[in-house]
Amino acid sequence: MTFFSNDLSGSGAAEEASVAALETTVAELAALGPRDLGATDWLTIDQKRVDQFADATDDHQWIHVDPVRTATGPFGSTIAHGYLTLSLAPRLLEQLLTISDQVRGTNYGLKPGTGRRADPPRSTAG
């Protein structure tokens, strides 16, 4: 199993979030500046979740979905997709930060190689 947390201590033990969520407003957010928000609860990313993500994204690369082949591969087991772990960031962030006057949240992609927000065309279902 793969565990995902912003706790880099390497303890591997499941533990509660280390701090209460910081509460702020949209106006106060920019003034906070860079800061350590603490650690989230550990989140297990099991093979079922990886397989479901592979199905949703049509990314069935062996390193993600073939436990037999990956047993002799570079990591010794399957690994989660990078975009799967990235997509979990909002779920983990809500354990660490509460914006009290937030009306809605919209997740944007990133411009390749920049780490900056992209403004993609809107994709509606259907």
Image (spheres, rainbow, N blue to C red):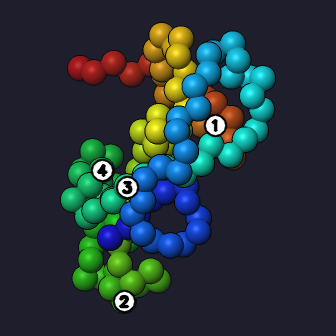
Which residue bears the numbered disc 4?
A: 53
Is residue 115 placed above or below 46 in the rendered structure? above
Q: Determine the residue positioned at 36% across, 89% down.
A: 72
Residue kind at label 1, given as amino acid type:
Lys
Q: Determine the residue positioned at 42% across, 59% down.
A: 15
Which residue bears the numbered disc 3?
A: 43
Measured in 3D between alpha carbons, the distance from the residue under mark 3 to the one under mark 1, in whole angstroms, is 27 Å
Compared across the picture, whether 89 is left or right of 9 comes to left
Which residue bears the numbered disc 1?
A: 111
Measured in 3D between alpha carbons, the distance from the residue under mark 2 to the one under mark 4, in whole angstroms, is 23 Å
Q: Earlier in the sequence, mark 2 or mark 1?
A: 2
Q: Determine the residue positioned at 59% across, 32% down.
A: 22
- Comparing marks 3 and 2, which lies closer to the viewer? 3
- Comparing marks 3 and 1, which lies closer to the viewer? 3
Secondary structure at badge 2 equals loop
Residue kind at label 4, given as amino acid type:
Phe
Residue kind at label 2, given as amino acid type:
Thr
Measured in 3D between alpha carbons, the distance from the residue under mark 3 to the one under mark 4, in whole angstroms, is 16 Å
Q: What is the crowding at mark 2: few (fewer than 14 residues within 10 Å), some, or many (at least 20)? A: few
Which residue bears the numbered disc 2?
A: 72
Q: Earlier in the sequence, mark 3 or mark 2?
A: 3
Q: Earlier in the sequence, mark 3 or mark 4?
A: 3
